[in-house]
Image (cartoon, helix red, strand yellow):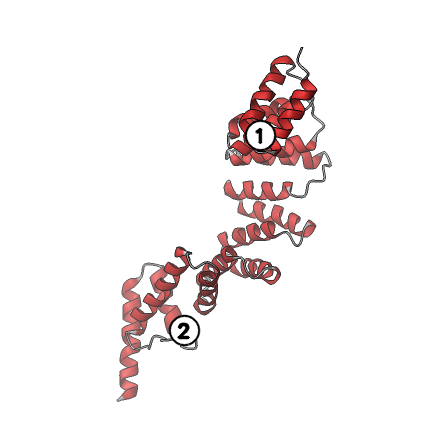
Amino acid sequence: MKDLKDLYQKARQFKRKGMLTDAVKLCDEIIAEDPQYDDINSFIGEIYYIKGDINKSIHHYEKQILKCKDNCMDYYRLAIAYYRSTQFNKTIQTLKDIINRGCQLDMAYYWMGLSYFHTGRIQKSIDTLEILRNKLPHNTVGCYSIAIAYRTIGNHEKAIECFTKILKEDPQIASVHYNLALTYLENMQADLAIKHLQKVIELDPKHKDAQNKLDDIFNDQEMLYSYGIKAPKDVSNLEELNINFYIGEAYKGFNMIDKTFKYLKEKALDKDKEEK
């Protein structure tokens, strides 16, 4: 009979070294000898998760919790595997169960909040992520996710508050600057959007989306200002971004191109009269 304890220790060493295929082979040998051996299904579930084979990971986690229903971490790992396989309702239910059992796993609220978000229950997502923010006020990923949720429902003020809070703690996160810029654009604050898009490009010169968005803003300005409002030559000089630009953009945003041109032409004619 094989020494299962020795095989298990070798499998763990293989996992630590990144030799995952070799670790799986040893685990298969252990299971063939004793399907109920220790926490073997939990261990092999972790390996398959790392390998990216989420379905096999779920299969082994489910087998583990059938054998041992008291380990909250196995349920937690299973819930995350469900999330990775886009089984969001299963993620929510699994995490609810362990929270109701009194398991102190604060990040459970994070995965639950994301799952609510992906099933379209945005307010539930926000409520859940707010619980996480109260428990872990300096948790960046939680704050980032809640900011995205607020932005999704159009609560720009709250989204800006969350993004800004992250940047106060770490001003070098390009993705936060980018999403904050998009929020400012949606809130018709182009000057602040430009500032953060420029910061994205400073942090990540290869960030094409930020560069394209910045180009779009100034291309639009050139078109708009060509009807009588001078476009700023220096992108850092934002004093000339005024209400005329915002109204034109608002019309454009609703595909009301004709109204945009009509409005700007009227402004241009008014300016001509003033100059005469």
Crowd band around label 1 with a 10 angstrom C-alpha radius: few (<14), some (14–19), many (20+): many
The residue that disc 2 covers is: 243
Question: In screen coordinates, is 187 left or right of 26?
Answer: left
The residue that disc 1 covers is: 47
The quadrant of the picture occupied by the N terminus is: top right
Q: What's under tag 2, amino acid-wise? A: Ile
The quadrant in which residue 214 appears is: bottom left
- In space, the residues marked 2 and 1 are separated at their CA atoms by 57 Å
- Residue 8 in percent (x, y) is at 66, 23
Q: Earlier in the sequence, mark 2 or mark 1?
A: 1
Quick one: which residue is furthest to the top in this view?
Answer: 1
Q: Is residue 163 visible?
A: yes
The number of numbered discs placed on residues in the rendered structure image is: 2
Question: As displayed, is residue 217 above or below residue 226?
Answer: above
Q: Nearer the viewer, residue 251 or 10?
A: 10
Question: As displayed, is residue 49 above or below residue 116?
Answer: above
Question: In screen coordinates, is 1 left or right of 47?
Answer: right
Question: In screen coordinates, is 198 left or right of 128?
Answer: left
> Which structural element holds mark 1?
helix
- Residue 140 in percent (x, y) is at 60, 52
- Residue 172 in percent (x, y) is at 54, 60
- Name the residue: 52% across, 52% down: 148
Crowd band around label 2 with a 10 angstrom C-alpha radius: few (<14), some (14–19), many (20+): few
Q: Is residue 37 visible?
A: no
- Residue 141 in percent (x, y) is at 58, 50
